[in-house]
Amino acid sequence: METPKFRSIFTSASKQERIENFENYWLFTQAHNGEILEDDKDLINKRTRLKFFQDNPVQLRIPLPNPDMFYRNYVAIKDNPKTLDRTTLMLTGIYKFARHEWVGIKGAWDVVPNMANSKSIEDKISRVHLAEEFCHVRLFDEMLRTCGLDKVEWMPLSPFKEKVYEQFPKFPGFLMNAPAFVTELMGVTYYCHLNNLINELLVDEPEVQKRLIELLDEIIIDEVAHVGQRRNFIGPIGMRVSKWLVRPFYTMFFSDIPEVARLFDVKQMIKDGESFDFNYLPGYIIEKSWIPSYCKM
Ligand SMILES: [Fe+2]
Ligand SMILES: [Fe+2]
């Protein structure tokens, strides 16, 4: 067995280490994303990458047998989930996960300071982070299009849930940081399990399989960096709270998306969250992503 290169994400860090890591992350995220295009909620490097995918589309060899089944169930499951095939469930599940992300960032975008009004490095990091999340929704949309689903609409959640998401970023840091970190961690867990499922379900569709993985990789590289970045906001007590929050958060969030329990081993996902340490991620993801210095051996 290879010697592990990274420590647990829950490893503690001093205040000084965290200050230095914010400075380092800020350099990373600028080089990684290029210029931010605030009017478009976009980033120049991500825009270029998405355009490459759009200009070089791939298609399923055999189109989805029943796209109506997707459209009937993607916003909310109407049929008995047991009657849906796993590929359709995977795609409606992707939409539901991405939709939560989209609602969350829509609420936050209007609340956090824009670049011109960002006073601290943390403010700037948070602004670029949100722009990245908008890019992810575009990448998810492209994943669905690649499967022939080009009539997807991004629907708001119920007014109550929309309100909850809008209030969240206004909470003070000591309340908001741990849940925000655990949410990023949950994203990485879900995307890693999704990666395996894409490989499994699209084995007879090599072009689309490869493309979906490429699109997902773009997201995973950012999300792995977000995990470290959001962890960097948190002191020792907050880290203990965060570890404790993994189980209830994952359970609550995933039970809201019925597809997840049908497709994935949620118990294993919780374990993966609680033991997360970057070691099991592929080298090419690690190389392009960012990891706090105190999580490196
Ligand atoms: Fe994201
Ligand atoms: Fe994220």
Image (cartoon, grey):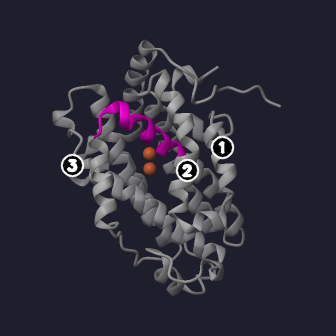
- Figure check: 151 above or below 249: below
Ligand 2 within 8 angstroms of badge 3 C-beta: no
Residue 180 part of the magenta segment: yes
Return the residue at label 2: 250
What is the CA distance from the residue labelled 2 to the residue labelled 3? 27 Å
Return the residue at label 3: 110
**Of the numbered discs in the image, which one, if any, rests on residue 257?**
none
- At horizontal 71% and vertical 64% (from top left) the residue drawn is 200
Q: What span is colored magenta in the figure?
A: 171-186
Question: Can you give x and y, in whole percent of width and height, for residue 273 in the image?
Answer: 61, 42
SS category of the residue bearing label 1? helix
Three-letter amino acid code at disc 2? Tyr
Question: Can you give x and y, in whole percent of width and height, for residue 197 in the image?
Answer: 66, 62
**Of the numbered discs in the image, which one, if any, rests on residue 272?**
1
| Overall secondary structure of the magenta section | helix
- At horizontal 36% and vertical 73% (from top left) the residue drawn is 153
